[in-house]
Image (cartoon, coloured by chain):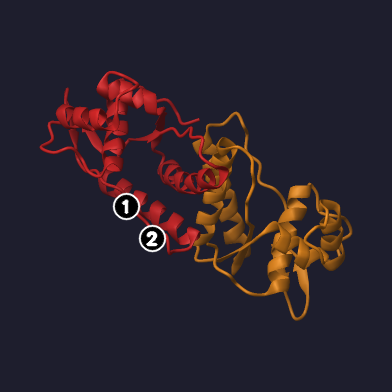
Chain colours: A orange, B red
């Protein structure tokens, strides 16, 4: 969650949503959905920035990722939030100046641009902040497709 | 949707949910979710039977399928409906007596067992009825995993 004030962007909150692998898939999907809805209700965002996924992993892991991602996008869509999707290269380019930036470089630039004391941890949280920062920097609102 | 009465199962409604490929993904996910919720509110089912997916197609199509499937499972989970998942072979075996049954054989057995005048169309609707019938025949309620 990043907020754009008068010429400044600040980080309000970041983190990761974890579910237990021991739980049935349907319970985990619900947990993800409810965690995102809780964030939406708490922060009342007007936009959601999501990283596009193009990965060459096997179909079974892509299917699982799709279940989780569907729950997240649905949480945004049901609350009439603009959903912007960015390719990983777009995010790296917007935040760190090059589409080939490493995870460490992206995390460092996130820290610098948001004037944070520490790099957000874990890496997935930093990635989330980078996606949000990308949206605030690029400033357009492409609808997720 | 199949209803189990005193020793008899009857078909209440079947069909397919279609979305437009021209719409953004988030809109399509929302349409699927809302269509399933509408069915849930109308029929007040106590269980949802879903076909498991193990397909060898590419990761990108599995990801898309996962988004849609996540929305459907979430609709059930948020309404505290028991979600039973069955492998395609289990469904064919329960409905048509063999895990190697063709789509036509499954559709024919669905028609016979539910005393329908016609085979449900399209094939995807017949598949949905077969999944529901499988659940009513097998009678256990494994939680989706």
Query: Mark 1 packing: few (<14 Cα in 10 Å), some, or many (20+)?
Result: few
Residue B122, picture quadrant: top left
Q: Is residue B34 visible?
A: yes
| Left or right of A118 on screen, residue B35 | left
Q: Are marks 2 and 1 on the same chain?
A: yes
Query: Mark 2 packing: few (<14 Cα in 10 Å), some, or many (20+)?
Result: few
Q: Which residue is mark 1?
A: B38
**Residue B118 drawn at (x, y percent):** 13, 38
User: Which residue occupies 50% across, 66% down?
Assistant: A80
Q: Chain of mark 2?
A: B
Q: Which mark is residue B20?
A: 2
Q: What distance separates the C-alpha of mark 2 from that of mark 1?
A: 19 Å
**Residue A32 drawn at (x, y percent):** 58, 46
Disc number lying in front (2 or 1): 2
Q: Residue furthest left?
A: B117
Report the number of numbered marks.
Answer: 2
Residue B78, picture quadrant: top left
Q: Earlier in the sequence, mark 2 or mark 1?
A: 2
Q: Chain of mark 1?
A: B
**Residue B13 drawn at (x, y percent):** 22, 43
| Left or right of A145 on screen, residue A130 | right
In the image, residue B34 sits, relative to residue A112, either above or below, namely above
- Nearer the observer, A14 or B67: B67
In the image, residue B88 sits, relative to residue A99, either above or below, namely above
In the image, residue A19 sits, relative to residue A124, either above or below, namely above
Q: Is residue A45 visible?
A: no
The N terminus of chain A lies in which quarter of the figure? bottom right
- Label 1, secondary structure: give it: helix
| Left or right of B25 on screen, residue B37 | left
**Residue A70 drawn at (x, y percent):** 52, 50
């Amino acid at each position: 969650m990043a907020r754009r004030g008068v010429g400044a962007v600040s980080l309000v909150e970041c983190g990761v949503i974890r579910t237990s692998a021991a739980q049935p898939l349907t319970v985990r999907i619900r947990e993800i959905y409810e965690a995102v809805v809780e964030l939406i209700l708490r922060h009342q965002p007007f936009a959601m920035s999501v990283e596009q996924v193009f990965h060459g992993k096997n179909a079974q892991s892509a299917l699982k990722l799709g279940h989780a991602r569907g729950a997240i996008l649905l949480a945004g869509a049901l609350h009439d939030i603009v959903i912007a999707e960015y390719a990983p290269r777009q995010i790296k380019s917007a935040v760190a100046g090059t589409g080939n930036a490493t995870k460490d470089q992206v995390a460092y630039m996130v820290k610098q641009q948001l004037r944070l004391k520490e790099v957000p941890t874990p890496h997935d949280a930093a990635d989330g902040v980078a996606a949000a920062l990308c949206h605030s920097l690029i400033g357009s609102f492409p609808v997720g497709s």
